[in-house]
Amino acid sequence: MKKILFVCHGNICRSPMAEFVMKDLVAENGLQDQFYIESAATSREELGNEVYPPAKRKLAEHGISCKGKTARQMKQTDYDRFDLLIGMDEWNIRNMKLICGGDPENKIHKLLDYTKRRGDVADPWYTGDFDATWRDVTEGCHCLLNDIM
């Protein structure tokens, strides 16, 4: 079983969008038994909070539910629990490596590194542009799944 943890700053926008998009893609391809997928935050700011309403709405527009998801903080033990730890931007990667004490097994990557246009997933918390984030997340998840399979 492939275990993937998606990570962003607060775990209320980008990483839960990636978590639920990836779960949807996996289900669409009949691969649910081959994957375990979660998301987490590098910060403590939003712990226990639900997915940000505009992110929830964007997922719902595409028939994807994130019901019951609340923000949790990434832990050092996640490094051993997951095969891949996927951050949304360079700051996430830096903080993920700090939390994990490095990346000796090369498990930590940015989501868009799996695409042809490397970079950071657009952060809708600052831009309000959930369409751009949706495009980045869906492209990244499709490419990540293709890379794994």
Image (tube, rainbow, N blue to C red):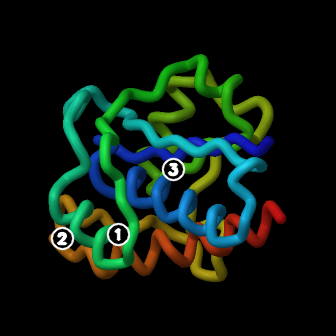
**In the image as oriented, which residue stretches furthest toward the right?**
149
Residue 122 marker: 1
Image point 50% across, 24% down: which residue? Answer: 99
Tell me the quadrant of the picture where the C terminus can be found. bottom right
Neighbour class for label 1 at 10 Å: few (<14), some, many (≥20)?
many
Using the numbered discs, state the Cα–Cα distance from disc 2 to disc 1 in whole angstroms.
8 Å
Q: Nearer the viewer, residue 52 or 61?
A: 61
Amino acid carrying mark 3 in the image: Gly
Q: Nearer the viewer, residue 55 or 32?
A: 32
Q: Are marks 1 and 3 in contact (CB under 8 Å)?
A: no
Image point 65% across, 27% down: which residue? Answer: 79
Using the numbered discs, state the Cα–Cα distance from disc 2 to disc 3 in whole angstroms.
19 Å
Neighbour class for label 3 at 10 Å: few (<14), some, many (≥20)?
many
Residue 87 marker: 3
Using the numbered discs, state the Cα–Cα distance from disc 1 to disc 3 in whole angstroms.
12 Å
Q: Is residue 65 left or right of residue 80?
A: left
Q: Are marks 2 and 3 in contact (CB under 8 Å)?
A: no
Neighbour class for label 2 at 10 Å: few (<14), some, many (≥20)?
few
Image point 59% across, 25% down: which residue? Answer: 78
Amino acid carrying mark 2 in the image: Thr
Amino acid carrying mark 1 in the image: Ala
Residue 136 marker: none
Whichever of callouts 2 and 1 sits on the residue coming sooner in the sequence is 1
Q: Is residue 130 left or right of residue 38?
A: left
Give the labeled residue for mark 2. 127
Q: Are marks 2 and 1 in contact (CB under 8 Å)?
A: yes
> Which structural element holds mark 3?
strand
Tell me the quadrant of the picture where the N terminus can be found. top right
> Which structural element holds mark 1?
loop
Residue 67 image offset from top left, x and y in percent: 31, 49
Q: Quadrant of residue 25?
A: bottom right
Residue 106 image offset from top left, x and y in percent: 76, 41
